[in-house]
Amino acid sequence: MQSFYITTPIYYVNAKPHLGHAYTTIIADTMRRFHAATGKETYFLTGTDEHGDKIVQAAEKNGCSPQEYVDSISALFRDLWPHLNISNDDFIRTTEPRHKKVVQDVLQKVYDSGDIYFGEYGGHYCYGCERFYPEKELENGLCPQHQTKPEYIAEKNYFFRMSKYQDWLKQHILDNPDFIRPERYRNEVLALLDSGALEDLCISRPKSRLEWGIELPFDNNFVTYVWFDALLNYVTALDWPDGEKFGKFWPGVQHLVAKDILKPHAIFWPTMLKAAGFEPYNHLNVHGYWLVRDTKMSKSIGNVIEPLEMVQKYGLDVFRYFLLREMHFGSDASFSEEALVSRLNADLANDLGNLFSRVLSMNTKYFGGVIPAPAEYLQDDMDIRELAVNAMRNYQQLFENVRFSNGLESLWELVRALNKYVDTCQPWTLFKEGNLERLGTVMYTLLECMRKVAVHLWPVMPDSSDKLVTQLGIPFDSTKINLPAEVESWGALPSGIKPAPGSNLFPRADLDALRKQAEEGKATSGNDQKAKEKKAEQKPAAAAPVEIAPIDFEDFQKVDLRVGTVLVVENHPKADRLYRVEIDLGEEKPRQVCAGIKEFFTPDQLVGKQVVVVANLKPRMLRGIESHGMILALKTEEGMQLLTATGMVPNGTKAS
């Protein structure tokens, strides 16, 4: 069996985790799940980097020892991952005894080979980067990462003969085009190597300046420089040198990093591996930054996004989907709550959610909630099956090459095509005509393709994948997912089983309403809460009496109220305040209604929502368009509120 070993960078514990950490780790988790679903044995490592100058400074600032400080911050990372459904096999800390031993053993091995020497060096030292910068790498005399002036330090240290491996590394990159991906970062590294700028690497700090680190095995007056310590965690976790895991998983190793640590992983690390006698890794996968208002996230400017806040508001799988869909891997991307809500409403509620809602509701109505057996497949059915094959194949190839956004778009081409297939085949017409054989084929084609979509979503949205497959009436077992087999096979969904009567897994979100609710929550805290309690004690003013004219029960029985799902919302071409709305009431075709709610709702707020309709109103023409029914709503001081069921119900359900 092939192996797959994925690592995140070990996160530096000078600050608590934020969106950038969450993104990298969710990507790694997705890669691990994807490769497991293609039949590989997988191993997933993450952890924390806990040595260096910045740790000592942060500990002093917090009035504690370095060990106490790293224990507390490392725990924040470890405790966050289960909340994001991260499935890591190991969580490594560079302060662990197992890691100290590996670092010292590798250092001794490289030292004995002659690739580590003692020398004197003077350079511009950035405490933020914990590295020396040559003059030519500074930008107007400032660190290119932190835009601060480095301190010039001259001292004796130990150096790794990194320059010795420049030609080897360049040739290895040329011979293996996907060694570093995406290509832009490969080209960046090659340009650096072509410039001849590769110097030997300082790998120690004198204890007179820094004691918080792993002591050099050949000189106890020095501790190991952070990169020669941190990078070796990737082999420590596999129990190098004699562990079974090292022999099994190192051949399938891939690293995942953000672009700010490209140079250490693309240059320091492979040359270290070569000097120590290790085979180089297979791929270095490099992603861009998440920007907030076009600026890199920074605690100092107050634009850091807290992952759990977004998860609590919109759901974990929505958050995971957004991160993979919104960022084109390798490029920077902008994070905004508006963009997240837009993806939720458009991709998940309107496209995927609406597909499951309408198809399961139709199956309940037309076949009593039992999945029918297909009859003869016609050209329309074969076309959608061919499209499904292409979509799945593209999705898998793109995920294999870390192009997650493009892969999800390929899968969504199938989702949108299935919605169109419903409109083209018109199951409601087939049912009305009594053509149950043809209807059974259409419904089975839809349901089987929906199953394929659901299992392909497991790497990205594991909980939702489970729920969608379960809604189709079959037990979910992630260990039995075989994505390559899905491309070639058909008919894994058994006929005769009972799926759910409907689905409402991705309700639409109203960002304005959520923000208003949050503001109201703030307003009622603290002193405002006391004011609210005082007001509650006051006797409210009597409301003006409302006169309600009575009707006979027989009159009420004449009103037929039905629940349906809004499919289409368009502006009325001749009326500024009207929408033309199409609603699935479980009939042979969608019901057209003209609704005077344009000033209160946008189309995005309506599509996919279930509404209550007066279904037996006589059709009438409203400014040239026939309207057959009325959407019920309430007008309040806060605005218009739509009437709906408290939970998802099959389309056409009668109110009684």
Image (spheres, helix red, strand yellow):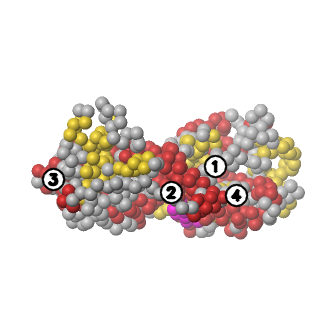
- Name the one closer to the observer, 96 or 379: 379
Q: Nearer the viewer, mark 2 or mark 1?
A: 2
Residue 312 in percent (x, y) is at 53, 58
Residue with the mark numbered 4: 13
Mark 1 residue crowding within 10 angstroms, few (<14) / some (14–19) / many (20+):
some
Residue with the mark numbered 2: 541
> How far apart, in angstroms, are the residues tagged by discs 2 and 1?
46 Å
Secondary structure under the numbered disc 1 in the rendered image:
loop
> How far apart, in angstroms, are the residues tagged by discs 3 and 4?
62 Å
Q: Amino acid at mark 1?
A: Val
Q: Amino acid at mark 4?
A: Val
Question: Does the residue at mark 2 contact the one at mark 3 (Cβ under 8 Å)?
Answer: no
Residue 182 in percent (x, y) is at 54, 42
Q: Amino acid at mark 2?
A: Ala
Residue with the mark numbered 1: 304
Q: Amino acid at mark 3?
A: Phe
Figure quadrant of residue 454 = bottom left
Q: Work out whether 617 lies above or below 89.
A: above
Figure quadrant of residue 9 = bottom right
Figure quadrant of residue 168 = top right
> How far apart, in angstroms, are the residues tagged by discs 4 and 1?
16 Å
- Name the one closer to the observer, 587 or 131: 587
Q: Nearer the viewer, mark 2 or mark 3?
A: 2
